[in-house]
Image (spheres, grey):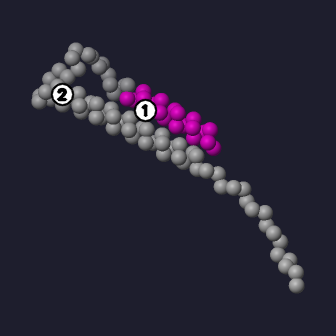
């Protein structure tokens, strides 16, 4: 008796999950960057003395740090949005 079961071609090989790995690395980099900035701030603040209002930047004026972080977040959002468009 002969076997009449057709032989099916195997599907395409599974792609490695490069985008998932890259996204994980990018998320880790962002988290480490924020942790480093927070650690630097806390170290400088601690080194300035026991009083919270003491001069801890040695005459360096930071006029608007909120704008700098907002601009950094905008650039990160632009990169993420373009990456999402490219991936789709």
Question: For residue 48, which numbered disc appears in the image?
Answer: none
Determine whether, in the image, residue 2 is placed left or right of residue 79. Answer: right
Q: Residue at x 43, y 38 (%)?
A: 29
Looking at the rendering, in which quadrant would you find the C terminus? top right
Q: Quadrant of residue 9?
A: bottom right
Determine whether, in the image, residue 67 is placed left or right of residue 80. Answer: left
What residue range appears in magenta? Answer: 69-88
The secondary structure type at the circle numbered 1 is helix
Provide residue 30's location: percent of width, then percent of height: 42, 38
Check if mark 1's residue and mark 2's residue have beta carbons within 8 Å: no
Q: Residue at x 53, y 46 (%)?
A: 21
Q: Residue at x 62, y 38 (%)?
A: 86
Observer able to see residue 53: no
Determine whether, in the image, residue 85 is placed left or right of residue 68. Answer: right
Q: Which residue is mark 2?
A: 47
Question: For residue 73, which numbered disc appears in the image?
Answer: 1
Front in this rendered view, residue 56 or 88: 56
Looking at the rendering, in which quadrant would you find the N terminus? bottom right
User: From mark 1 to mark 2, how far is it between C-alphas?
Assistant: 28 Å
Q: Quadrant of residue 51?
A: top left
Provide residue 12's location: percent of width, then percent of height: 72, 56
Camera-nearest label, 1 or 2: 2
Provide residue 65's location: percent of width, then percent of height: 32, 25
The secondary structure type at the circle numbered 2 is helix
């Amino acid at each position: 008796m002969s076997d009449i079961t057709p032989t099916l071609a195997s599907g395409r090989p599974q792609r490695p999950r490069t985008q998932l790995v890259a996204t994980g690395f990018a998320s880790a980099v962002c988290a480490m960057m924020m942790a480093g900035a927070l650690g630097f701030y806390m170290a400088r603040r601690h080194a300035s003395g026991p009083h919270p209002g003491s001069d801890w930047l040695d005459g360096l004026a930071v006029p608007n740090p909120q704008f700098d972080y907002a601009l950094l977040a905008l650039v990160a959002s632009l990169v993420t949005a373009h990456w999402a468009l490219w991936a789709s």
